[in-house]
Amino acid sequence: MESIPIRMDRTWLNNFLKNMDQDAGWSTWEGYRLALEAADHQRIPDFDTLRCLEYVTGFDPLPHQIETAQRVLGEMKGRAILADEVGLGKTIEAGLILKEYMVRGLVKSALILVPSSLVIQWTRELNQKFQIPATPQKKEWMWEQYDILVASIDTAKRDPHRSKVLNRHYDLLIVDEAHKLKNRRTKNWQFINEMKKKYSLLLTATPIQNDLHELYNLVTLLKPGQLGQQTSFNTTYVAGKRKPKNEEQLRDEVRRVMIRNKRSDGHIAFTKRHVRTIPITLSPAERALYDGITQFVREQYQSAHSQLKSLLSLITLQREVCSSRDAAFLTLFKLLKRGTEGKDTLSPEITQLVELLRAVETQSKVEEALRLVQEINDKVIIFTEYRATQDLLIRALNERDIYAVPYRGGFARNKKDWMREIFQNRAQVMVATEAGGEGINLQFCHHIINYDLPWNPMRVEQRIGRVHRLGQSQDVTIFNFATENTIEEHIVWLLHEKIDMFRSVIGEVDTILEQMGLNEDVEKNLMRIMLESQDDTEIKEKLNILGDKFTIAEEEVRSEIERREVLMDGTQPS
Amino acid sequence: MEPSQVRSLALRYLEAYGCQIIETHPDYIESRLSIQVDKDLIHRPFYWMYVEKMGLEPQPATLLFTFEPGKAPPGVREDLLTSGAPRFQQMLLSARKNGRFVRLYEDNSRRVQRRDSLPYEPWLALHYQISFLCDRKKDDLVSLGIHLRTGEIVENFDQQLQHREWSHRLPDRRHTLPLLLSIPEAVGELEYWLQGWIEHQDLTWADHAMAQLNQELAQLHAFYPEEWRMSDSLHEEKKQRLRETVWQYHPRVEVETVGAGLFYLTSQKE
């Protein structure tokens, strides 16, 4: 290079001359030395080494995350699509990159746009893991006042916020869930396109969902012209809506701006899962109660007076009995009340059920849980669907001097953190009713007891995902309680034997269910099978058919994914 | 940076800025901060405004610094100082802010007895941080000295200042001679020297950045249609993309003055 622009700093000179003039304001020899040494410590000695690793606290970034950060900062010059599969830590990668730029003074202002439900979680991660002073955007004036903001894209793109965002220059823009930017005609896409930014990171686990143009739009938003003009892209790469051509070349182009780490990449180590079914035999009193309720449900169904909805709640009663007497009690109590108020004919039968319920004294499942927790003699998380069961378990554990803490969705964030911390440091057991949402990470725990099971495979996967995730260093053992000769046994059979939910990460469960046309309704669907079947054989048959459908849908989804993946990395379709 | 280095730097900083050291334990240091350090390390401007307005007795904070996690005595809140910890970074910034300028006279009166007054050699020392920037960045530190009567320039001047004793005031039987070079003139000379130094550094990184910049610009020009085909908004969009690209890649050097000192040295003949 012939000559490089140099900016000399002379802002100090006037102050120095003033000191000379007034013979005041001088530091000491030691103060001067400290200033020079401080500067030496803060010096960035080379272009490449990641300095941010010294600054992260409380966790160790994984090798693939560090490598991703290095490639984005190096080869990709700070404009990249981070497309790791779910659960591999895209947030960590983005945090490392942001922190590195901040440590080097290359980023002073940054905007992180995320779905509104994730604003707080992102802010916390940046604050706690990276010591980045990020603030959640709440008020309109904050756009101008804060340098590092986390905001919801839906808020940002609307006036009066929109014009404020577009007025600023951002050294770094991060967009999470960037598959929402796949259509060029949407407000989202146009808004991001209009923003002034130096570096940008687009995060998505699904850079292509349906067709190639989505990928084109995403890359063009990141680096216009990287994949050429639309027309030339179409003629070069698009054979049909879902069919690419010149794949090799397209893959090379995409690889320049996108990084996709996958679970199947050998270098990301997941530990094994062991699954054990624990059969529970009901005591005679419990058996009588269960049979009584089953009988009651059948009669109600056959009498055909009741509406389907209230019939479904009866199935819930059946499930609750499998969980605990306490869980069933509340529902039964409600039915009893409804019966007396409406002067329905129900009450005598229900009164009889309440009698049966009273007769239950010891609960076989609780006994088994206590025995198992003691046998494991290590940290255990017990999942249940019911609040009443949760309370019962905590009481029972504490009576045996086993320290157990509760965890549920209704807890405030602080309380959730607190409970997690107690579990990590002091308690042996956590009894949780919730696994989804923004969830908690419990990699320090290696045992899961499914005290009862959700009937939605999505939620089963979320439960296991709390413990068996990246950073888990040991094999994880999953215990499924199955009460013999009840509907619970059928469900355990379906989820475990039939569709093999527990042994491996299926992933994409939501897509599979969608493919089956079930999605949210899977639970209702199962309840209906339970209700409408004449006997166990019929239940089994119907579940078998459902399981087969799941397997077929799973295969379809998998081959669809494979077809997409071909474009995103080097693997060939088998 | 090792915990022991962090510890020794922190201790020196606390002592240099008048903090009371309550306890130095192998695992931690407990200190009651001076007012100045409290203001620099603990962000609480409203407290200080209140105390000063109301004329109250200031209560600077007492902190317990550890250098590895979990080393504090039970029940005491620890302030973990590691090389990347925000608190330690604040310390470094505070040290840089407060230690920028010195004027010192070398004092060898304890070693050398004499009758007549001797003149000093006046030097301006500048400690520069030179940042090389494109889409990435690295820094170099250069220490220079210039003789304010002869204009002689010395590299690594820093090292010549070690192992001497200093006084804030002009010692007895010493006098200074008038400077033949004003401070701004001397700074100009050093900057000129520094420019030559920078141009002799390995600047292949800048060539690469420039090549990358040109390639990116070409890609943009190829992507957008010809000028006359573009709508106003598309035109504006292209201009914006071009500006961003220059902003991201253009290679440049930024020089910051970390420290400046006026040093009166005894002549070597003494």
Image (cartoon, coloured by chain):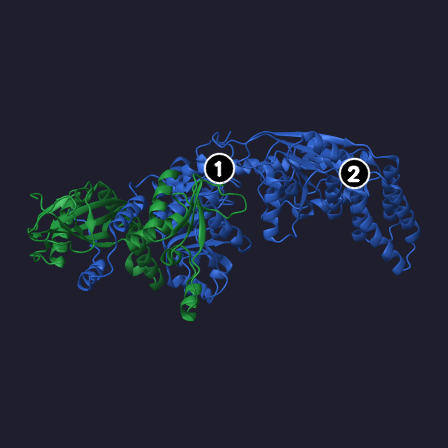
Chain colours: A blue, B green
Residue type at numbered disc 2: Ile
Residue located at (60% from left, 38% from top) = A467
Q: Is residue A478 left or right of residue A132?
A: right
Viewer-side residue, A54 vs A5: A54
Viewer-side residue, A253 vs A159: A159
- Check disc 2 and report its element: helix, strand or loop: helix
**Corner quadrant of residue A461:** top right
Residue contact between numbered discs 2 and 1, judged by CB atoms under 8 Å? no
User: Can you say whether A193 is above or below A101 in the image?
Assistant: below
- Check disc 1 and report its element: helix, strand or loop: helix
- Residue position for label 1: A565
Q: Which mark is residue A177?
A: none
Q: Residues within 10 Å of mark 2 (few under 14, many from 20)?
A: many
Chain at tag 2: A
Chain at tag 1: A
Find residue A390 and report its horizontal and vertical position in percent: 73, 45
User: Can you say whether A28 is above or below A281 in the image?
Assistant: below
User: Can you say whether A364 is above or below A303 in the image?
Assistant: above
Find residue A223 and report its horizontal and vertical position in percent: 36, 49
